[in-house]
Amino acid sequence: MARARGWLRARNRVREHFELRVGRPPRMLRPINHVDHVQWYKFFYRDARLPRLADKVLVKDHIRECLGEGWTVPTLWTGTALPDSPSWPVPYILKANHGSGWNIIVTDDNPLDVGKARRQTNRWMKRVYGGWWGEWLYSKISPQLLVEPLLLVDGAIPLDLKMWTFHGKVRNIQLQDHPGHPNRGASNYSVDWVRQPFSGKAIPEHPFDLPRPERLEEMVAAAERLGAGFPFMRVDFYVLPDQPLIGELTFYPTSGFSPRLPLEYDDALGALWRMPNGSSPGRGECAVNNVRRARPSHRGGWKSRTTTTPRHQVMPRLIRCGRRNRVRLRHGHQRTWHRASRRRRNSRAGPW
């Protein structure tokens, strides 16, 4: 029950924050636009492969298995505690493998303060990232630290090229500046590098068009190969002149709180989502387990339906039951809905 209560608390926090950011509650069970589907992805899609792909250390093995050598950033060191006297070549970046934004950039102008960095990394190792907003997969990652060389192009951190794949097909390419850029911006392009008339809510749009990357076709093919078999995956590249490198794989961009504006484009991206069996969640079917809800029996009384959920999609089970349609939780691989039919008793009692 503790796990179920944590799931409910995270869902309630997401509902409140989503309404503040978007202006309406999220449609988790019947998602329509892209941000709705990301919330459904977080709370109702439990694939055992996701934690390994979100792990910044283990994902490099997966990328090498799929694409071969030369697509990952070299790793200088991994461990769970910072050494007393680090001797890695400057510049480099120190990261945590189980979070987002947890990194320390070390350059000649910004040397490493070992004592301060050790206190900060110790806090990283004790924290579970993403639980506040229901991003369950980060809690399944064994915390580690890793050090990578800091990639620079003409003395600056290169642009991030983020490919949005839906079921193994790249449908949007987002090109944005790194988080520390003074005038950070982003712009969206099609696979043919045509500027798209929408932008995200979290990052302002670039006022100018950016040149097409030289090896765009190779990056698209690599992203589609990595994203095959998943409803959604964002593949993040570093745009380098000689060889593009993959930084990470992301499944919940901005935790589903930043819709594409104007909103009709977010609806268009939401139409690209499909369930694992190919159907679309929310279009006349229940998005939780892809079956129609139980209907009241014409004979009165109870009518229930039990369906088997794939074992990799493990989540607290919502069970609708009782005369007042109360909701309770349980665990397991079976889900049952009970819905009382509308029966009229005698005229004195009236309807339920």
Image (cartoon, rainbow, N blue to C red):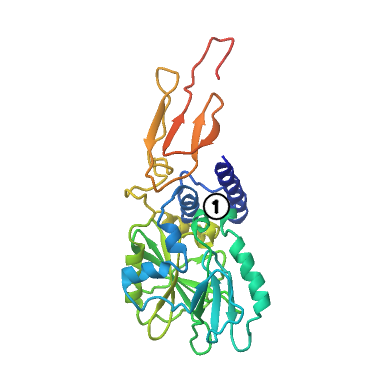
Q: Amino acid at mark 1?
A: Gly
| Picture layout, residue 151 above or below residue 329 | below
Q: Quadrant of the N terminus?
A: top right
The answer to which quarter of the image holds residue 302 is: top left
**Nearer to us in this view, 125 or 83:** 83
| Picture layout, residue 54 above or below residue 304 | below
Q: Position of residue 247 (x, y in %)?
A: 45, 73
Q: Position of residue 14 (x, y in %)?
A: 58, 51
The answer to which quarter of the image holds residue 85 is: bottom right
Q: Position of residue 279 (x, y in %)?
A: 34, 47
Q: Residue furthest front?
A: 84
In the displayed structure, does residue 313 sit left or right of residue 221?
A: right
For the question of whether residue 221 can be seen, the reply is no
> What residue appears at the point 47 percent right and 27 percent down from the top-left corner?
339
> What residue appears at the point 60 percent right and 65 percent down from the top-left corner?
124
Q: Position of residue 15 (x, y in %)?
A: 58, 48
Q: Which residue is mark 1?
A: 134
**Nearer to us in this view, 132 or 36:** 132
> What residue appears at the point 58 percent right and 46 percent down from the top-left corner?
6
Q: Quadrant of the C terminus?
A: top right
In the displayed structure, does residue 119 sit left or right of residue 161?
A: right
For the question of whether residue 146 can be seen, the reply is yes
Crowd class of label 1 (few under 14; some 14 to 19; many from 20; radius 10 Å): many
